[in-house]
Image (cartoon, rainbow, N blue to C red):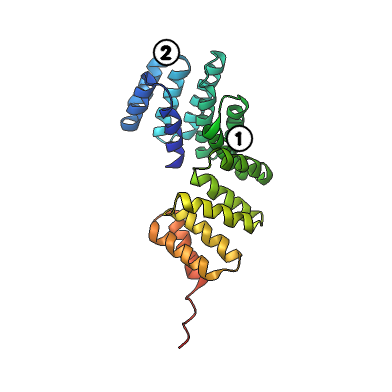
Amino acid sequence: MIALALLLLAQAEMPADRLDACAALADEQPEAAIAEASRWIMAQGGAQARQCLGIGYAAQQRWLPAATAFEQAAREAEVARDGRAAQIWVQAGNARLAAGDAPGAHAALTAALSSGILTGGERGEAHLDRARASVALGDLKAARDDLDKAVELAPADPLAWLLSATLARRQGDLNRAGRDIAEAAKRSPDDAAVALEAGNIAILSGAAEAARVAWQAAVAAQPDSDAGRAAAASLKELGSPPAAPK
């Protein structure tokens, strides 16, 4: 799952210590990780103890408790002037996104970005996540600003290009959409979601056969995924290709 992977990716950048042990435990035994976090919190473990609790809840996909734990951890880290506060705010934002709480996600990710600590690709990923929250809130202009920063700062991430292409399509900028989906396809050529979006852009651009090829690729790549099923439905709606002349 993307949300859990992002949370654990942020965690993987932390130094090897008790928190890493908690993450490893959460991967195998989430309940044990939550119990460990509770003991650690009682022993005045500070921000890392609460982050451990968030990781345990995230491993169970209990996104709202996870977000609350991460937010408490981030605030404690800020008070302690712990430079990891921004990364924890990113974890909180992703948990809020997974829970469907776009306003909470936007607030957490704004806190992460406002800290000035995140740089480079890490900052680009935070802009990408905040763009997702802005889309959910219906603020496409803010999402566009964040996605422009995401593709600039994290150009190796195909998701940044995919979401940028999707937003451009929604805003009627098919030229931008076409360029960005091509960048996504370079980085993730076998991703059904990328192929689905390439087909969506092609059909709106009047290129029905290109759309057919893209949707067929999506179905071939991941037929049981949401993107694969959506591509199959689009192919059915498109109908059979015209017969070749005799």
Which residue of the protein is positioned furthest toward the right in this rendering?
141
Image location (x, y in percent) of residue 152: 58, 40
Disc 1 residue crowd, few under 14, some 14–19, many 20+, Cα 10 Å = many
Identify the residue position indicated by label 1 in the image.
106
Q: Residue 175 sits in which quadrant?
A: bottom right
Cα separation, mark 2 vs mark 1, equals 30 Å
The residue lying at 41 percent from left, 61 percent from top is 219
Determine if residue 137 is in view. Answer: no
Image location (x, y in percent) of residue 55: 42, 28
Q: Amino acid at mark 1?
A: His
Q: Residue 33 sits in which quadrant?
A: top left
The residue lying at 39 percent from left, 61 percent from top is 220
Q: Amino acid at mark 2?
A: Met
The residue lying at 58 percent from left, 48 percent from top is 164
* Callout 2: SS: helix
Q: Residue 116 sits in which quadrant?
A: top right
| Disc sitting over residue 42 in the figure | 2
Q: Quadrant of the N terminus?
A: top left
Image location (x, y in percent) of residue 218: 44, 59
- Whichever of callouts 2 and 1 sits on the residue coming sooner in the sequence is 2
Q: Nearer the viewer, residue 58 or 80?
A: 80
Which residue of the protein is positioned furthest toward the left in this rendering?
28
Q: Quadrant of the C terminus?
A: bottom left
- 201 versus 3 height, above or below: below
| Disc sitting over residue 214 in the figure | none
Q: What is the number of callouts on the image?
A: 2
Determine if residue 187 is in view. Answer: yes
Q: Nearer the viewer, residue 162 or 240?
A: 162
